[in-house]
Image: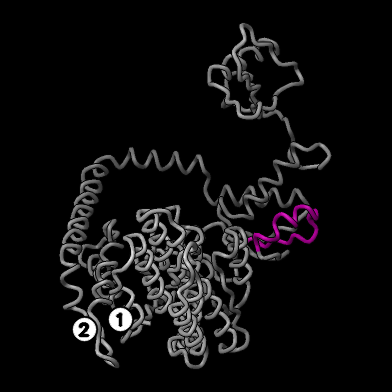
Amino acid sequence: MLAYARETIRDESGTRFRQRVRWWSLLALLRSLASSPVAAAETLRNRAAAASADSVEEADLIGRHSVMDLLDDESAESADVAPGADPTLEDEGRPSRERRRLLEMAREAEGLQGAKDEKLQKAVGLVAELVKDGYQPIVFCRFIPTAGYVAEALRAKLPKGVEVAAVTGLLPPAERETRVLQLAQAERRVLVATDCLSEGINLQDHFDAVVHYDLSWNPTRHEQRERRVDRYGQPSPKVRVVTYYGVDNQIDGVVLQVLLRKHRQIRHSLGISVPVPLDSDQVIEAIFEGLLLRGQPRGEQQALPLFEDLVRPQTEDFYRRWEGAAEREKRSRTLFSQESISGHLDAVRREWDAARAAVGAGADVAAFTRQALAAHGATVGGRDPLAIDLAEAPRALREVLGPAVGDRTRFQARFELPVPDDVEYLERTHPFVEGLATYVMDTALDAAAGGVARRCGAIRTGAVACRTTLLLVRCRYHIVTQRPPHPQPPRRSQYSAPRPQGARGSGAALERCASCWRRSA
């Protein structure tokens, strides 16, 4: 594959657009080649995403989103799909020789799956060692095919009783969290995931080890993976992290040498973690271009220490800018910590107490959960942890709350961290608490549902000087899209009206209509 890549990058024929499409197809090939044989085979058969662009700029944009580990919102979804390495354009015939060569390499890659895949076999041993030592690991892969491939091998090789599940971008976000909660019910478990789980889902309650099966081309991704597990609320005193790479793999070597080790060096020396400069993807492009253009004698394998002469020309300026950003960040944090907060601790404490009072603490969540469940017929006992039994609760409530706790009807819960492995941590935003609050509110507003909460009530208190009526209303607007001399007020029963297709209401019309509605009411 490297020989094919070197031949292709030296091909200067065609337009600038055609050359950029070939370049992104080569980076996709390198990316999947370092991941797994199954990802490499799929990439070799797929068409390069940049080939569908209409310009050089669009090809670069599509190529970066499909190959690089960008952190913007647009690349969050579908970032783990295997890219394509076939640079053929739709409006031209497939070059038979090039296409045959790609398919031949794909078949060779498929022949390396399983027992011949040394990377896979070594990783299975590492994960088995973690499980044996009592850890519950997460194995992070770059591509969907690799994650499924690794999960299947782990199921076959790990001892009986170890549950293995895979979570990738093929699942919608809500189902990803459900899959994780279901896996968490197993006593011994291994989660194989792509970077779709590196943000947004707390994993510290159920896992305490991270294996980087594929190196990310952005060190911030590595930190995001680890911070899903090594964070506040982790009950285990130690979190183990395994960074896995090939010592004679030139692709892993570039990423490890240029990005990951430098990122770790800055974090250790300055005590803070600083993201790489925004144009780090361009540095990676330049380094890989130098790697491919450099060439090697047949059979020679280049180990990591020999990368210095390759890395130095393209990275010295990049490192200077990165270290400069780290120094500025450190000065900024020192300024804020010593000059802005010092001497104003009372004001900070008042703001903190006000925020805690507004959102509620664990005791408030516990009181609501206990009272609401008991009012709906569920059995609630104990104090810390709380023993919850939903068997006698209404069926509709069990259907709402079941998925949030792995479809269990009996479990124990705590409302403060840390929590042991067999106890559920119910925070304010936990799906169980949110589902319970939503059910209480919905049944209160539905007279036929027979809810325990009421739509109205009276409270006697000395905290209010005069009789006060509070209304919690759902506001709706009658949108007027034209401006007649005197808009007609809506009838009492007409709180809303459909907007004419293609029309837009103005703020003035909304304000005028609302005042008309108040007069008519």
Q: Quadrant of the N terminus?
A: bottom left
The residue at which mark 2 appears reads as 305
Q: Secondary structure at mark 1?
A: helix
What residue is rendered at 54% in x and 67% in y?
168
Asked if 435 appears above or below 37 in the picture, the reply is above
Q: Is residue 175 left or right of residue 73?
A: right
Three-letter amino acid code of the residue under disc 2: Pro
What residue is rendered at 58% in x and 60% in y?
414
Q: Which mark is residue 250?
A: 1
Q: Is residue 181 magenta?
A: no
Spatial CA distance of label 1 from label 2 is 11 Å
Based on the displayed image, in which of its 4 quarters is residue 248 positioned?
Answer: bottom left
Query: Which residue reaches farthest top?
Result: 485
What residue is rendered at 71% in x and 58% in y?
380
Based on the displayed image, in which of its 4 quarters is residue 307 positioned?
Answer: bottom left
Say which of marks 1 and 2 sits in front.
Answer: 1
Q: Residues within 10 Å of mark 2 (few under 14, many from 20)?
A: few
Asked if 261 appears above or below 483 in the picture, the reply is below
Percent of width and height locating residue 327: 18, 56
Three-letter amino acid code of the residue under disc 1: Gln
